[in-house]
Structure formats: C-alpha cells, structure tokens
Amino acid sequence: MLRQFCKYNNWANSLLLNTLVTHSDVLPESCIKLFSHIVNAQIIWLCRINGVQPQVTVWELHEIEACSLLLNVSSNELSELDYPETAESPIIKYANSTGDFYETSVADILLHIFNHGTYHRAQIAKEMKINNLKPINTDYIQFIRLQ
C-alpha cells in the first residue's frame, strides 16, 4: 500500500506542479510557498531516511523552476526506495527542525510524507479558489480512476 501511496503522491505533485506552471503569471505567492514546503519536506525526510544532511530548510521558498527540479529528484528517490512492511520497518533516529530527537519507523515516515503532501495540496487548492483560479482534482480516487 505504501508503494501505491508513493505513486499517488508523485502523480498528484506532478499534476499540481503543471497547474502551477500554467498559472505562474497570476499565482499567489502562498501557493508557491506551500508547494516549496511540500518539496522541502520530502527532501528532508528522505535525507533522514538516508542518514544525510538536507540542503534545504522546511519553509525555504523556491522559484517554480527550482521546485520542479527538487520535486523530480525527491519523487525519483521515493520511487526507488525499498518499501518495508510495517512490522519489519527499520527505525530512523533523527533530529527535527527544532532540534528535538525522535525515533520513527521508515513505514511511518513514508505514510507521513504522503499524508503531508495531501494536506498541503488541499491548502493550495483553497488558495487557488480564493484567487479565482480553478484548482485541480488531486484526490486519491481520481488517481485510481485514471489507472
């Protein structure tokens, strides 16, 4: 199921990116800020899983072109992971952005990444609607219907 959520997450983020690019001339900065955050969070969590220091911060703002490059890298890396069963998922030790230390299973981290993206894509859809832009449907069921 995690692998399926990864495919959905990558599909939804790519679809949203294309929409943001299409409307880049009238897009509110709040949409880019939230999309940057989605991409940054994916990278940060992947770095934690891989035991390396991330080169981005959680709320770092990127231009849409940089978002596209970072999304491509993080989506590919998410797709190439070995997806563990929850019961046998490795535990990752890490410090969060405020310096607090935690231990979390890779399976729970992956589920968080996918859920986190859904949450912020909904915020972007709301921002688009408020700014008279038609949001796209990135619901999971829409992804399934297109398979």
Image: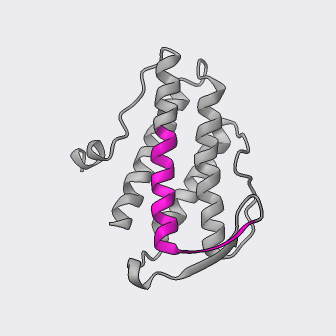
Q: Is residue 101 above or below residue 27?
A: below
Vertical comparison of 86 with 139: above or below: below
In the picture, the quarter occupied by the N terminus is bottom left
| Residue at the extreme top of the image, as rendered | 132
Q: Is residue 105 magenta?
A: yes
Residue 134 x %, y %: 42, 21
Q: Which residue lies furthest to the bottom in this view?
A: 88
In the image, what residue occupies the spot 43% across and 52% down?
Answer: 9
User: Is 104 or 26 nearer to us in this picture?
Assistant: 104
Does the segment drawn in magenta span residue 95? no
Question: As drawn, is 61 to the left or to the right of 137?
Answer: right
Give the tally of numbered discs. Answer: 0
Q: Is residue 9 above or below residue 21?
A: below
> Which residue does the image show at 77% across and 64% down from the upper left?
99
Residue 13 visible = no
Foreground: 123 or 25? Answer: 123
Q: Position of residue 80 (x, y in %)?
A: 48, 70
Q: What stretch is highlighted in magenta?
A: 100-121
Give how far across and how far down residue 39 sits, in percent.
60, 49
What's the residue at 52%, 66% (across, down)? 109
